[in-house]
Image: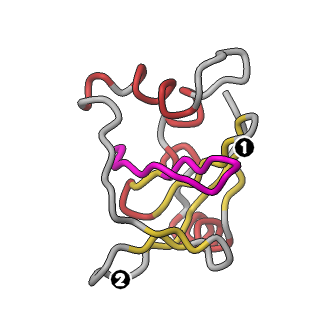
Amino acid sequence: MIPFDLTPVAANHVRCTGCSEYELLGDIPLWLSEHNAAGAVDQIDGWYRHGGGWRDHPGFDIDLERLTLNYPGDPALPAIAQAQLRDERIILFDGSWLAVIQADGSHRVARID
């Protein structure tokens, strides 16, 4: 398990609704381990087989300064939590979207619900 840091958006949601961090993040933090040599996408894919596995959704941009996930024509989705797995940055966004960003800035996005 790797630790995720809640963004201010998510922390405010937890305060206002009383939901737990687990209710907000689900099992994803449990699926990721420093002890597994595989990257984040492969680790998530292995655990999410019941939901169809990791399926890339191309066309998204990520604004790392605003921490938003953007798709042309759609409203920006705010980040709710983020973590680091070795050289990969993992960001969970509202609406069950997840991005894995590599050190070179390339990224992969999937919906993990």
Please identify the quarter of the rendering in which residue 15 is found.
bottom right
Q: Which residue is mark 1?
A: 84
**Quadrant (top left/top right/bottom left/bottom right) for the C terminus:** top left
Residue type (three-letter) at the residue carrying disc 2: Pro
Q: Is residue 64 above or below residue 37?
A: below
Q: Position of residue 99 (x, y in %)?
A: 50, 52
Count numbered badges in the picture.
2
Q: Is residue 57 above or below residue 54?
A: below
Is residue 103 shown in magenta? yes
Which residue lies at the image location 55% right of the left edge and 47% below the top edge?
100
Q: Which residue is mark 2?
A: 75
Q: CA distance from mark 2 to mark 1?
A: 26 Å
Please identify the quarter of the rendering in which residue 32 is found.
top right
Question: Looking at this view, is 43 or 26 the one in front?
Answer: 43
Q: Residues within 10 Å of mark 2 (few under 14, many from 20)?
A: few
Q: Position of residue 61 (x, y in %)?
A: 46, 69
Disc nearer the start of the sequence (2/1): 2
Give the magenta-colored segment's residue range: 99-112
Which residue lies at the image location 53% right of the left edge and 73% below the top edge?
68
Q: Position of residue 44 (x, y in %)?
A: 46, 30
Q: Residues within 10 Å of mark 1 (few under 14, many from 20)?
A: some
Please state if 106 lies on the left or on the right of 57 as rendered. right
SS for dot 2: loop
Q: Is residue 113 above or below residue 92?
A: above
Residue type (three-letter) at the residue carrying disc 1: Gln
Query: What's the coloring here?
Result: secondary structure
Q: Position of residue 40 (x, y in %)?
A: 56, 33
**Quadrant (top left/top right/bottom left/bottom right) for the N terminus:** top right
SS for dot 1: strand
Question: Looking at this view, is 97 or 108 the one in front?
Answer: 108
Which residue lies at the image location 30% right of the left edge and 22% below the top edge?
49
